[in-house]
Image (cartoon, rainbow, N blue to C red):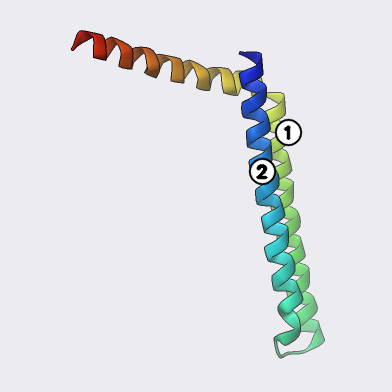
Amino acid sequence: MENKIKKMYCFDCAILVGLAALLVFIVTYVLLSLDKVPGSGVVRMAIMASGMLALAFALTGMTTVMFHLRQNSKELYSSEMGVEWIHTNMEKLESEAL
């Protein structure tokens, strides 16, 4: 059971890291394409600052979720595995009843 919890935790962390990398790529691409937008330098700097601030908040949120998963992994994944066990046994009982 401990290995399954660890595997589920690692899988969830891998998903979060992948999404964070995708987010960084997209925001970086958008911020680098600001050169093509007409306007003054002040407007560009304001847009870049807001984009970087949004990126910082999003990455902070993802990091917070990762810490939450690490601190509560046994409780979260044990309850999830318990639900899976109940569903599996209910399906077995239903198939045996028929």
The residue type indicated by label 2 comes to Leu
| Residue 22, image quadrant | bottom right
Q: x and y percent of residue 59 in the render?
A: 73, 50
Q: How crowded is the residue under tag 1: few (<14 C-alpha within 10 Å), some, or many (20+)?
A: few
Label 2: few (<14), some or many (≥20) within 10 Å? some
- Residue ID at (73%, 80%): 34
Name the residue rendered at 65%, 14% in the picture: 2
Q: How many labels does the image show?
A: 2
> Which residue is rendered at x = 29% and y = 10% of the image?
93
Quarter placement of the C terminus = top left
Element type where label 2 sits in the image: helix
**Quadrant of res 68:** top right
From the viewer's perspective, is residue 16 above or below residue 87?
A: below
Which residue shows up at 76% across the image and 55% down it?
A: 56
Q: Position of residue 44 (x, y in %)?
A: 76, 80
User: Up-down: is 60 above or below 29?
Assistant: above
Q: What element carries label 1?
A: helix
Q: Which residue lies furthest to the left in this view?
A: 98
Say whether disc 2 or disc 1 marks the residue closer to the N-terminus: 2
Q: Which amino acid does label 1 sit on?
A: Phe
- Give above or below for 41 relative to 31: below
Pick the front one: 9 or 58: 9
Alpha-carbon distance for marks 2 and 1? Answer: 11 Å
Mark 2 lies on residue = 16
Residue 67 is marked as 1
